[in-house]
Image (cartoon, helix red, strand yellow):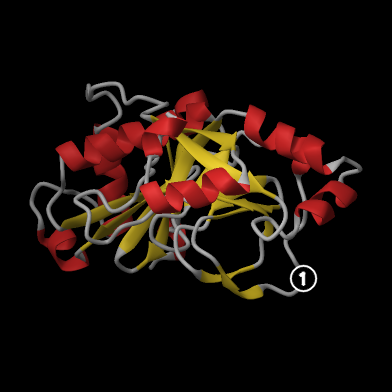
Amino acid sequence: MSGDNFIHIGGQGKAAYTVYYLSEQAVTMQFGNDINTGTLQRVKRYHALIEANPFPGFYAAVPAYATLSIFYNPVEVMQSPELSGADCINRLTAYLKSLDDVNVAEPSTCGTTVNIPVCYGGKFGPDLSEVAAVNGLSEQQVIQLHNEAVYTVYMIGFVPGFAYLGGMNSLLATPRKQQPRVAVPAGAVGIGGNQTGVYPLATPGGWQLIGQTPLQLFDAASEQPSLLKAGDTVVFKPISADEFNNYLITGNAAAYN
């Protein structure tokens, strides 16, 4: 990787993006540092453009909050007569610039609305009192602020099916636990910094747990394993412990939609 070719800027003004090496087999498009629906729309647009117009050697494109990482075979990229440039990053930057004015169906910013029932506090949310104390709120205020917001899924990562959500009220922002738990149950709803999310699988984790959903967010045997996808809208709905247990018995998701 040449130092002179490590970073490139594409576009102008609000359309600007940075392209840099992620590895010898990947580059990343950086669209900014803010988490917002405008940035999400741009990430999704270029994701759709690249998928619809793959370059020689293209493997995959992986979206995140404000980036799109593009994985490729460097040998195919350098040998392709369709691409021009002294190295991979120059060739791919030129390719990406060629997509700037290509028309593509405008991606939706909201996707599907998914209602997620949550039983807050008690054994379901052992850190609810800590989140309340840190922010000078009552437990009921934490619950209300958490479920009255409408969230956007910005990316899936960390573990399969884990959705990073934007839209949480800043009054709920709470530092992660200094000592992460060895095991967090599937369905646990947590707060980490200024974000909230749901653990789709039992896994170690350091987020503050305020509740739990009986919904299954990830099913490896399903045609679409992850219940949530980037661009979806999420609304949390508080339920009682009895409703939580009833769902586990009946699996009646319709009651929450």
Give the x, y percent position of residue 159. Answer: 44, 63
Residue appearing at x 25%, y 35% in the figure: 48
Residue appearing at x 10%, y 55% in the figure: 80
**Is residue 19 visible in the rendered structure shown here?**
no
Most foreground residue, 208 or 76: 208
> In the picture, which quadrant includes the N terminus?
bottom left
Instruction: Indicate the amino acid at tag 1.
Output: Gln
Residue appearing at x 19%, y 50% in the figure: 223
Give the x, y percent position of residue 219. Answer: 30, 58
Q: How many numbered marks have been drawn onto this rendered protein structure?
A: 1
> In the picture, which quadrant includes the C terminus?
top left
Residue found at the very far left of the displayed protein: 81
Left-right relation of 194 to 189 = right
Left-right relation of 250 to 123 = left
Left-right relation of 7 to 78 = right
Most foreground residue, 229 or 208: 208
In the displayed structure, 143 sits above or below 86; it is: above
Quadrant in the rendering for residue 101? top left
Within 10 Å of disc 1 (Cα), the crowding (few <14, some 14-19, many 20+) is few
- Which residue is label 1 attached to? 178
Quadrant in the rendering for residue 97? top left
Residue found at the very far bottom of the displayed protein: 182
